[in-house]
Image: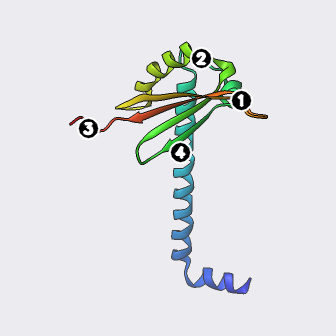
Amino acid sequence: MDALITLVHQHPVAILVIVFAITVIGFAAYVGLTLRNGLKASALSAKPLSLIKEQIKHCSVKWHWNPSRITFTIPAIYTSDEEINKWADTVAPRLGMRFQPTEVRIIPRKFYRSARYEVTFTKLRRLR
């Protein structure tokens, strides 16, 4: 304990810089998570699908950076094939520029997990 007190007395500016850096990193992580959760809720509550908050909690989103894509996993009990395809076309512009729905897969039921849809949106590269 004495070593910590001595360190604080000898290097107060360094301690303040470290505390400030940790605070900024924590705030940035919080803002990033809030934006992602907001995008997830906005996308899943879009009109053809129109999920409520309790249903949105059962859905998941995976973000892939290289190549840029977003994958939504939605339980099949909340929607049908036609609705999921309409939803994918409607939501693509909400996700940002140049995102297109590229794949809609049905993952069958396994043991304790129910069937679900996996919708992948991929960012299109420059057209050649």
**Pointer 1 or 2: first along the chain:** 2
Residue with the mark numbered 4:
31
**Pointer 2 or 4: first along the chain:** 4
Q: What element carries label 1?
A: loop
Q: What residue type is labelled 1?
A: Arg
How much space separates mark 4 and mark 3, taking CA atoms? 30 Å
**Pointer 2 or 3: first along the chain:** 2
Query: Is residue 18 left or right of 90 when viewed as pictured?
Result: right
Q: What element carries label 3?
A: loop
Residue with the mark numbered 1:
109
Q: Is mark 2 on a helix, strand or loop?
A: loop
How much space separates mark 3 and mark 1, taking CA atoms? 38 Å
Residue with the mark numbered 3:
126
How much space separates mark 2 and mark 3, taking CA atoms? 32 Å
Residue with the mark numbered 2:
50
Q: Position of residue 40 (x, y in %)?
A: 56, 32
Task: Identify the residue at image location x=51%, y=64%.
Answer: 21
How much space separates mark 1 and mark 2, taking CA atoms? 23 Å
Task: Identify the residue at image location x=55%, y=14%.
Answer: 83
